[in-house]
Image (cartoon, rainbow, N blue to C red):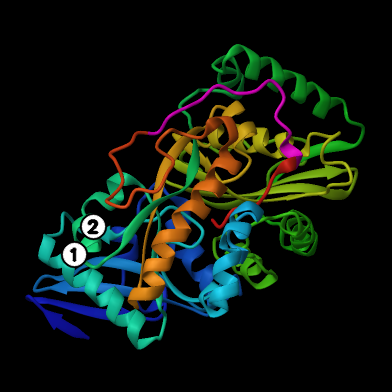
């Protein structure tokens, strides 16, 4: 534990070692990716990082901030960008091959939106101590690159002066996707869509309903399906451009066992009748699509408070396009979130065109990055923003925002925006982003 300016910093190596009730007090109540159960599952799984840690900032009153950390000993930088960005990084790999094998400290959440958990507004001195403690930990662990991952402009605003003073630079990351809810029924959600997306949605729903043997269920107990879930997820990952995190059997098993299952949904129903006060409205659930008795698609969903997240998907590409499997599980997840009283549901940083058609807004997010040594820091600052901007433009297509370019000073105070949707997005081009 270090002390500076009246603050103390402590590093804890597991979420279960935090003081009782602290995580529940500080974690965002409506962001299901920040529940203790999800954090524990990440620690138990082998999803990418070599280890996890939590930086605790104390003052005289106790813990005033918690920052989750992921420690990568040898992250391949060219594995977490798209093919075009990979080509832009190729000269770096030829000149400095070790630079692309990055010992990296990631601050925030590997699978979700970045937050610094606090009891209130922190002073500039407290934030300076926290950032310096992050860099001290990176030095002691021999992790040269330090990244604050997927922070919104609002979340990053207070940290920006301390990060800028510590020679961090800022670049846009892929935006999050969020569908705002509040409708009383799925039919009301459909009616609220713009004309073309509404017609497309109804057309897809008719095709899904007409597919012989195809049905969608919502399951609380899906332990017997975990091998099939993993196999379908691996089909998606085999087509992925970016692989910062890869879920494994141990993570899925930990997720399944980490929350007490409520009563299973009726097999005949596309979504259960859970309401806001029902235990099934919290925790994790599997939106499962079957062709007869064979699992052909899933969307793993998490719930907390008024929020839901469709976190990871699996598709059987043998029939994915013709059966509209992508839309089948997403429509079922939206129906489930509405019936569970959620105010929003988030999806992954992928497949932006179909998600905009679903009604999602794009939520602006940023990376803050530095390197402990001047030369690699200069190279990263020169080349990485171009590579990430290219990756973002390719992923967003017509939904790319004008400000989606490197911002060496800091992120502007942007607001989530929504773009028009194409008539027929190709959901089969789903790729998995580093999130």
Residue 395: percent from left, percent from top: 59, 43
Question: What residue is shown at x 87% (from left), y 41% (from top)?
Answer: 319
Q: Quadrant of residue 59?
A: bottom left
* 337 is higher (above) or lower (below) than 202: below
In the image as oriented, which residue stretches furthest toward the top?
Answer: 195
Asked whether the beta carbons under mark 2 and mark 1 sit within 8 Å of each other, the answer is: yes
Q: Quadrant of residue 16?
A: bottom left
Q: Is residue 301 magenta?
A: no
Q: Quadrant of the N terminus?
A: bottom left
- Alpha-carbon neighbours of circle 2 within 10 Å: few (<14), some, or many (≥20)? some
* 167 is higher (above) or lower (below) than 268: below
Q: Is residue 417 magenta?
A: yes
Question: What residue is shown at x 42% (from left), y 44% (from top)?
Answer: 405
Dot 1 falls on a residue whose secondary structure is helix
User: Which residue is tagged 1?
Assistant: 127
Residue 296: percent from left, percent from top: 82, 47
User: Which residue is tagged 2?
Assistant: 159
Nearer to us in this view, 140 or 209: 140
Prevailing secondary structure class for the magenta stretch in the rendered image:
loop
State the extent of the magenta-drawn residues as a range.
416-428
- Distance between the alpha carbons at the discs numbered 2 and 1: 6 Å
Question: What residue is shown at x 60% (from left), y 45% (from top)?
Answer: 350
- 87 left or right of 378 in image: right
Q: Quadrant of the C terminus?
A: bottom right
Residue 284: percent from left, percent from top: 57, 53
């Amino acid at each position: 534990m270090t002390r500076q300016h009246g603050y103390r910093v402590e590093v804890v190596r597991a979420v279960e070692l935090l003081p009782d009730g602290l995580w529940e007090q500080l974690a965002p109540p409506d962001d299901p990716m920040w529940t203790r159960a999800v954090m524990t599952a990440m620690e138990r799984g082998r999803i990418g990082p070599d280890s996890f840690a939590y930086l605790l900032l104390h003052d005289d009153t106790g813990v005033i901030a918690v920052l989750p950390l992921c420690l990568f000993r040898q992250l391949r930088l060219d594995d977490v960008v798209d093919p075009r960005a990979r080509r832009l990084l190729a000269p770096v790999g030829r000149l400095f091959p070790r630079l692309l094998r990055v010992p990296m400290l990631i601050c925030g959440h590997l699978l979700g939106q970045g937050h610094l958990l606090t009891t209130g507004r922190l002073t500039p001195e407290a934030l300076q101590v926290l950032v310096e403690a992050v860099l001290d930990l990176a030095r002691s662990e021999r992790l040269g690159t330090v990244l604050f991952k997927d922070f919104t402009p609002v979340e990053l605003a207070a940290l920006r002066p301390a990060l800028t003073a510590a020679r961090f630079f800022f670049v846009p990351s892929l935006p999050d996707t969020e569908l705002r809810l509040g409708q009383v029924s799925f039919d009301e959600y459909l009616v609220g869509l713009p004309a073309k997306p509404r017609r497309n949605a109804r057309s897809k729903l008719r095709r899904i309903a007409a597919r012989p043997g195809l049905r969608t269920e919502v399951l609380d107990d899906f332990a017997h399906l975990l091998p099939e879930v993993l196999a379908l997820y691996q089909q998606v990952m085999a087509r992925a451009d970016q692989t910062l995190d890869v879920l494994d059997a141990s993570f899925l098993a930990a997720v399944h066992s980490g929350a007490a299952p409520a009563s299973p949904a009726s097999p005949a129903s596309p979504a259960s009748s859970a309401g806001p006060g029902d235990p099934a409205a919290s925790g994790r659930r599997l939106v499962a699509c079957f062709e007869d008795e064979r699992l052909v698609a899933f969307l793993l969903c998490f719930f907390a408070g008024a929020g839901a997240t469709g976190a990871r998907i699996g598709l059987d590409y043998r029939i994915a396009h013709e059966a509209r499997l992508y839309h089948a599980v997403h429509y079922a997840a939206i129906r489930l979130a509405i019936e569970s009283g959620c105010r929003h549901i988030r999806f992954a940083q992928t497949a932006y065109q179909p998600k905009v058609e679903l009604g999602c807004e794009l939520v602006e997010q940023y990376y803050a990055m530095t390197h402990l040594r001047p030369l690699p820091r200069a190279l990263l600052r020169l080349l990485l923003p171009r590579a990430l901007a290219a990756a973002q433009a390719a992923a967003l297509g017509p939904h790319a925002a004008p400000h989606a370019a490197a911002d060496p000073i800091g992120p502007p105070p942007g607001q989530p925006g929504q773009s028009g949707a194409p008539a027929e997005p190709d959901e089969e081009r789903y790729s998995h982003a580093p999130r």
